[in-house]
Image (cartoon, grey):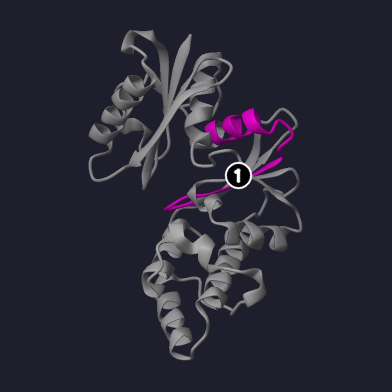
Amino acid sequence: MITCGVDIGARSIEIVLYDGAQIIESIIVDTGARPSWNGENAFLKTLETAGVAREDVERIIATGYGRNYFKLADRSVSEIICHARGVSYYFPSARTVIDIGGQDSKLIELNDQGKPLDFVMNDRCAAGTGRFIEMTGAVLGIPVEEMNSRISPQEGKVDISSMCAVFAESEIVGLLQRDCSIPAILNGVFSAVARRTTSMAGRAKVRPEIVFTGGVALIDGVTRALEIETGFKMLIPHDPRITGALGAAIIAFEGSSSSLVH
């Protein structure tokens, strides 16, 4: 049996095909202004790439903020449930998920069965998200995908006092005018993102094993900053961007239900 998970986020859409043991195929596309249309086209492209016929897909589950846009889904499931399930596939001993995407960040506490105990989410402010890092890159003239090659822990860091994206932009411009090095500014921004993420924990506890997911997990400097902030090593899946879609595909395969399903 083949199932499919579709995660429609604010910035990207992830599609995963799953056969009960492994990922058959996955794809990531931009959400764009037409998430329904882009999601359906991404789904059909995934089938084509994998050589799977539409009728061979037994069940489809959608998740993410735009899950209701995907009309081909058999049902939708909370992204918290899906991220937890996807992370547990890679790391069964995980107890905390830190997910930082383009427009939101979340921290999920898991029990010893890999199910969510509690969670907190930042989805109303760019601070502590990929958007904040993209803004920094635009000011510095450095694309996000090039940041790993431009940073070094030995360069030190500057303190970014403002976590409002608008005010932080002015602060970064001022740092450049004072000839602060770009690696030090980047390290400061990454440290600020890590502080913001861990400080929002509230009721949800941060305890190992900690799995870092989302597109921002591809930035080494943020991983290092989180490890310094928490005192624990971050575990990162092979592709940290697809854990939500993977979890949805696994839930579809298992036919599981939850009180958080809607």
Q: Residue at x 37, y 33 (%)?
A: 67
Q: Mark 1 points at which residue?
A: 119
Q: Can residue 142 be seen in this view?
A: yes
Residue with the most extreme front position = 149
Q: Quadrant of residue 154?
A: bottom right
Residue with the most extreme bottom position = 178
Q: Where is residue 162 in the image (x, y as percent from the top left)?
A: 51, 76
Q: Residue at x 50, y 77 (%)?
A: 182
The relative height of residue 67 versus residue 20 in the rendered view (above or below) is below
Q: With 209 as the anchor, is 222 left or right in this view?
A: left
The relative height of residue 96 versus residue 180 in the rendered view (above or below) is above
Task: Return the residue nearer the eye: 72 or 150.
Answer: 150
Q: Can residue 15 be seen in this view?
A: no
Q: Is residue 65 magenta?
A: no
Q: What's the residue type where badge 1 is placed?
A: Phe
Q: Residues within 10 Å of mark 1 (few under 14, many from 20)?
A: many
The relative height of residue 95 versus residue 183 in the rendered view (above or below) is above
Q: Where is residue 31 in the image (x, y as percent from the top left)?
A: 31, 42
Position of the C terminus by quadrant: top left
Q: Residue at x 45, y 16 (%)?
A: 3
Q: Where is residue 219 in the image (x, y as percent from the top left)?
A: 54, 56
Question: Does dot 1 land on a helix, a strand or a loop?
Answer: strand
Q: How many labels does the image show?
A: 1
Q: Residue at x 61, y 69 (%)?
A: 152
Q: Is residue 95 magenta?
A: yes
The relative height of residue 181 versus residue 70 in the rendered view (above or below) is below
Magenta range: 82-104
Q: In which quarter of the image is residue 118?
A: top right
Q: With 6 as the anchor, is 254 left or right in this view?
A: right
Q: Where is residue 187 in the image (x, y as percent from the top left)?
A: 58, 70
